[in-house]
Image: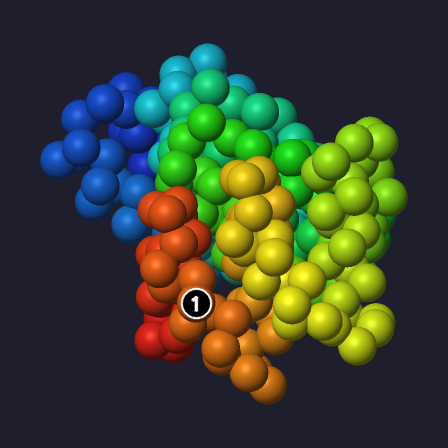
């Protein structure tokens, strides 16, 4: 009966994918079914539906499942390149929770989204860069093509292994390169357990995603 209920919910979401008043309750009920043991792999029916709204709902579900979404990690690289900014946003969260060294290419895709055109996606990536383990960042950096993003990712990894120079972080935070500012804000977040000064400085950044990230991080919302 449980499996049939999950199947029914998936069919309801597919049939009414753009009707929020139908999809919202159905998605919440399906999330409960997934927590109760309904196979997460069955979300592939939504992910491969060709319906952007259904894909968005499925990716949101994965982002809410925490470690239960791990079996779907092979689906994530495509979602990180999806045209919908919301899909990319939710997919980043899945990688943060479930990304391991063997998922280096997917982590690299997340890091590359630091240059995404969408402010919300960049904000989500900033949170990823501030929260990810050193092993996750190293795995992603190793799979990046040579260029500025790879250099910045490598710098962030080294900050965990070396004595950080706050002046270097501040220089990047105040510099002209928006991507370097994003990585510097992530560094400020990673260093904030010992010193919140850099993060307090980031609250006044010109970049919206950096300002809101710094405000939420300082308030303990992340």
Q: Quadrant of the C terminus?
A: bottom left
Residue located beneath label 1 in the image: 201
| Residue at x 56% of width, y 67% of height | 188
Q: Quadrant of residue 128?
A: bottom right
In the image, residue 31 above or below residue 51: below
Q: Nearer the viewer, residue 30 or 142?
A: 142
Q: Is residue 86 left or right of residue 160?
A: left
| Residue at x 83% of width, y 38% of height | 143
Residue 39 shows in the view: no
Q: Nearer the viewer, residue 35 or 193?
A: 193
Percent coordinates x, y for residue 1 in the rendering:
39, 48
| Residue at x 71% of width, y 38% of height | 149
In the image, residue 111 above or below residue 69: above
Q: Estimate how packed mark 1 is, as few (under 14), some (14 to 19) or many (20 or more) residues with alpha carbons within 10 Å.
A: some
Residue 9 shows in the view: yes
Q: Nearer the viewer, residue 122 or 148?
A: 148
Q: Nearer the viewer, residue 133 or 48?
A: 133
Q: How is the image coloured?
A: rainbow
Number of dots carrying numbers: 1
Q: Which type of secondary structure does the marked residue at label 1 adopt?
A: helix
Percent coordinates x, y for residue 70 in the rendering:
65, 51
Q: Is residue 8 left or right of residue 200?
A: left
In the image, residue 83 above or below residue 68: above
Q: Looking at the image, which residue sits at the far left?
A: 21
Percent coordinates x, y for residue 60 in the rendering:
41, 42
Percent coordinates x, y for residue 140 in the rendering:
77, 46
Q: Is residue 34 left or right of residue 105?
A: left
Q: Looking at the image, which residue sits at the far top?
A: 50
| Residue at x 83% of width, y 71% of height | 161
């Amino acid at each position: 009966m449980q499996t049939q209920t999950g199947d029914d919910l998936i069919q309801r979401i597919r049939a009414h994918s753009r009707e929020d008043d139908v999809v919202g309750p159905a998605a919440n009920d399906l999330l409960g079914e997934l927590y109760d043991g309904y196979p997460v792999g069955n979300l592939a029916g939504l992910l491969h539906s060709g319906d952007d709204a259904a894909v968005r709902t499925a990716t949101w579900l994965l982002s809410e499942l925490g470690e239960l979404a791990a079996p779907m990690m092979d689906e994530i690289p495509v979602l990180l390149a999806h045209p919908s900014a919301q899909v990319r946003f939710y997919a980043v969260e899945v990688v943060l929770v479930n990304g391991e060294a063997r998922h280096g290419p997917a982590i690299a895709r997340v890091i590359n989204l630091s240059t995404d055109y969408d402010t919300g996606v960049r904000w989500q990536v900033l949170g990823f860069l501030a929260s990810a383990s050193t092993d996750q960042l190293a795995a992603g950096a190793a799979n990046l093509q040579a260029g500025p993003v790879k250099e910045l990712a490598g710098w962030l990894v080294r900050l965990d292994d070396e004595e950080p120079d706050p002046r270097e972080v501040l220089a990047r935070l105040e510099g002209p390169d928006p991507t370097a500012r994003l990585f510097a804000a992530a560094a400020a977040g990673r260093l904030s357990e010992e010193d919140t000064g850099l993060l307090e400085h980031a609250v006044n950044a010109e970049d919206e995603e950096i300002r809101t990230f710094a405000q939420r991080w300082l308030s303990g919302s992340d």
